[in-house]
Amino acid sequence: MRFSLKRYLPKGLFQRSLLIIVLPVALMQGAVTWAFFEQHWRTTTARLSENIAGDVALIVKMHQRSDGEDFDQTAALAFTTLGLSVEHRESDTLPTTRRTAFFRVLDRTLRRALAGKLSEPFWFDTTRYPNYVDIRVETEGGVLRFIAARDQVFATTGHIFVIWLSGATLLLLTVAILFIRNQVKPIRQLAEAAEAFGRGQDVERFKPAGAREVRQAASAFLDMRARLKRHMEQRTQLLAGVSHDLRTPLTRLRLQLALMPDSPERDAARSDIAEMEAALEEYLAFARGQAGEEPGPVDLTALCETLGDDAARQGVDLRLDLEEALTVQAREGALKRALVNLVQNAAAHGQDVALSARRQGPRIEVIIDDDGPGIDPELREDAFRPFNRLDDSRNANHTGVGLGLAIARDTVRAHGGELRLEDSPLGGLRARVSLPA
């Protein structure tokens, strides 16, 4: 199995942009920090520790050679010339406990320096006093205690460098977050506007903002939206005219047939006119889409219960299995028409029809099952094509013109959902509608 770094990288534009800025800076500051501590701070600390260790060794040697005499003069000389406070503690011993500094490298450096200069046992503490270091050396007759200023032993500028570096990093990170967020915000708004327009919602308040390229994309989106709205309005007007022109002669024909005496020919003609009117309604429903209807909160549970009542009045026994309080943002009329098409399609091909609605995470699923002949998996996508009528037993009834599934999927997709056809547990076809909650 090949290792892929891409799967571990952030997916969002904001996170990726932040990574592009922060990662090089972090690498650079890491290299600078390593160079500072390795080349300057450690070297300086090592030299200071070696110097103080040499001074301590010198005082110890002077004390041993004088056999403890004139110690006060030695201590005064060490204080005035070396800045060391020296105290001789007779009959004293070295402490057995030791506290380790937070930066252990300090203790290791001083221990290495003292071990290299002294042959006598020693002990030191770098944590007891904030500004001083306590060093003790065991000699004959007692212990010599040295108190040295901390800056004589270690380079004390390391923490200042770390503070400045951390402050600069935090400031840079804050500026980068604010800048990138302001750059990503217009892109997110454009995506939200495009998604809302795809669901048929109004995005009149959206305005181009951000960088020049983002403004260009936003302007192109607004132009596309205007063209699509103009096209939909023209199509609706054209269909209104076609509907009027076709309904008038059909109405005259129906009136003429009503005045004719009963005959098999008249019944056949009336059946043809009814089929033409049904086909005309289906054409208009497909072409109108969702024009003229504003989206809003829809009680999906109540809508499905209404479908059950309507189906019962038409003689269809629709079994319902609904979850309470299911709400979606949709055009109620368009969504109802889509579900009615699916229920009618199931009832036309099966005797046992069931409808269920459940919440599945962030989405709501509506499932319509039937026990009919079903559709072969390789033909299911063809069933969604407008005016397509399958030739197998699934299309044994000859009502309609093959627009029911096309209208249903077009409506569901316009609401940000998806419609799929699957095998039903009842033995027929399952229509699964997935909508955002």
Image (cartoon, grey):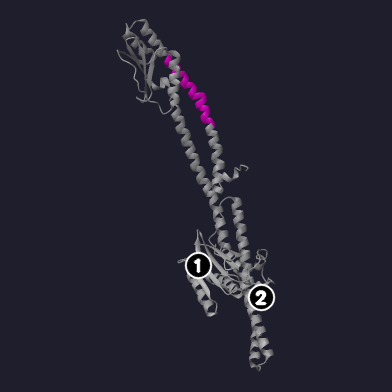
Q: Amino acid at mark 1?
A: Gly
Please state which of residues 343 and 428 is positioned toward the viewer in this rendering. 428
User: What x and y, as percent, mark residue 280?
Assistant: 64, 78
Q: Residue at the location (42% across, 23% down)?
A: 107
Is residue 199 left or right of 265 when viewed as pictured? left
User: What x and y, as percent, mark residue 177?
Assistant: 50, 45
**Looking at the picture, does residue 64 appear above or below residue 434?**
above
Please give the residue where the numbered disc 2 appears in the rendered image: 396
Q: Which residues are magenta?
A: 31-53
Q: Neighbour class for label 2 at 10 Å: few (<14), some, many (≥20)? A: few
| Secondary structure found at label 1 | strand
Is residue 59 left or right of 362 when viewed as pictured? left
Q: Residue at the location (43% across, 27% down)?
A: 103
Q: Determine if residue 99 is in view.
A: yes
Magenta segment's dominant SS is helix
User: What x and y, as percent, mark residue 44?
Assistant: 48, 21
How many numbered tags mark residues here? 2
Please state which of residues 110 and 1 is positioned toward the viewer in this rendering. 1
Q: Is residue 45 magenta?
A: yes
Please state which of residues 344 and 403 is positioned toward the viewer in this rendering. 344
Please give the residue where the numbered disc 1 appears in the rendered image: 296
What separation in Å lies between label 2 and label 1 (alpha carbons)?
38 Å
- Nearer the viewer's eye, disc 2 or disc 1? 2
For marks 2 and 1 on the same chain, the one whose residue lies earlier in the sequence? 1
Q: Amino acid at mark 2?
A: Ala
Is residue 118 left or right of 400 when viewed as pictured? left
User: What x and y, as percent, mark residue 164?
Assistant: 46, 33
Q: Is residue 36 magenta?
A: yes
**Looking at the picture, does residue 272 appear above or below residue 142?**
below
**Looking at the picture, does residue 83 appear above or below residue 164?**
above
